[in-house]
Every structure is written in structure tokens, then in C-alpha cells.
Image (tube, grey):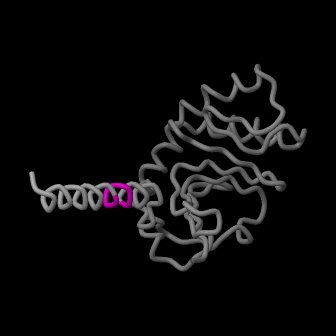
Amino acid sequence: MSLKSSLFKMVFGFVLVCFALGALVFWMADPLNLRAPKDQKLLTLFHDHRAAFERLRQMATEDLQQKKASYFNESCFYGKLDEMRKQGYKPLVSEIYHGLTVTVDYDATARFCFAGGGMILAIGPGWVKGIQYVPGNYERKGHVVQNLDEANTLPPGVYLREIEANWFIFYQRDAD
């Protein structure tokens, strides 16, 4: 084997590894929203698991008011929840969707996040799509639109599609 042949194989291997790493980072960032669920899928999930959404919202709001938690998913609970309360959350979260993340804001707005991306760097633009409960005036929470399947074509901001009173599909994209 000649030196030229060995060098070619090393350079080719390096380029291949760089390409694979670049593809992995691109897939993780998902800047094209390829993992964003379609509105119909979210509508079906909401209607099929309506009671679980409501129970999760109630529990999360109670815990936020008691300053125990404001963010959780199936495996991570950020806050001061006791083990029994965590066990109450787990079956509800896994009933709805594996990988679901739930957040609650100071005003009891609850978000059920199904997919997100573009957040490789803490300061980079990102997006998230899911279902949101908005108590009170929803107009201050986002722009109401008829369809969010192509939301990545909209300007940065928060967009809502009404499901029923106080419940919305939401899409949020941060500025570039």
C-alpha cells in the first residue's frame, strides 16, 4: 500500500466522519421543522386524551401555585415534588405522548410541548409546537391562525390555532 493511497483513505474517512457529524447536528437542530407534528395529529391526541390533558393542567397549576414545580416530562421533574406526586404525573404524561414536556407560566398558562428544534446553541433561534391552555385573554399570548402545518414559513413569534375554549395548538419560533 502506497503512502498516497493511505493518505487518500485517511482524508476520505475524515470527510465522511465530518459529514456524518454535520448531518447529526442538522437532524438534532431540525431547522426545517421536519419533526413538527401536523395539526390533525395534535387534534386527535387532544380529543383522545382530553381528560389526561385537563388533569395534568390542574396538577401542574396547583404545583406552580405552591411553588413546587413549573416544568416536567416523563423522566425529569424540576422542583420540589414528592415521590407520590411524581408518580401521579408519570402515567398521565406517558398516556398522552412519549417525550411530552409540560410547562406552566405564572398566569397558569399550561404548555404541552410535543416537538422542538433549532436550539443547538443557547442563543440560537428555536421552535416548539404543541398544545396550550390559556386562561383568560388568549390574544396576548399569540396570533390566531387557521392552520399551523406550515408555521415555519411565518415570521418569528407565537401562533395559536383554537381547538376549543381556552385550548389551542401553538407554534413558537424565536427570531434568528
Find the magenta span and give its range. 18-22
Residue drawn where x is 60% and y is 25% of the image: 91
| Quarter placement of the C terminus | bottom right
x and y percentages locating residue 128 in the rendered image: 56, 59
Residue drawn where x is 48% and y is 66% of the image: 148
Whether residue 25 is in magenta: the answer is no
x and y percentages locating residue 146 in the rendered image: 49, 69
Q: Nearer the viewer, residue 82 or 93?
A: 82
For this orientation, the residue located farthest to the bottom is 155
Q: Is residue 7 above or below residue 42?
A: below
Residue drawn where x is 47% and y is 67% of the image: 147
**Side of 134 where 175 appears, left or right:** left
**Side of 28 where 120 appears, left or right:** right
Whether residue 19 is in magenta: the answer is yes
x and y percentages locating residue 162 in the rendered image: 58, 61
Q: Nearer the viewer, residue 11 or 82?
A: 11
Q: Is residue 48 above or below residue 6?
A: above
Q: Is residue 152 above or below residue 47?
A: below
**Side of 24 where 114 appears, left or right:** right
Q: Quadrant of residue 89?
A: top right
x and y percentages locating residue 10 in the rendered image: 24, 56
Q: Nearer the viewer, residue 2 or 78?
A: 2
Residue drawn where x is 64% and y is 63% of the image: 122
Give the dominant element type of the magenta stretch: helix, strand or loop.
helix
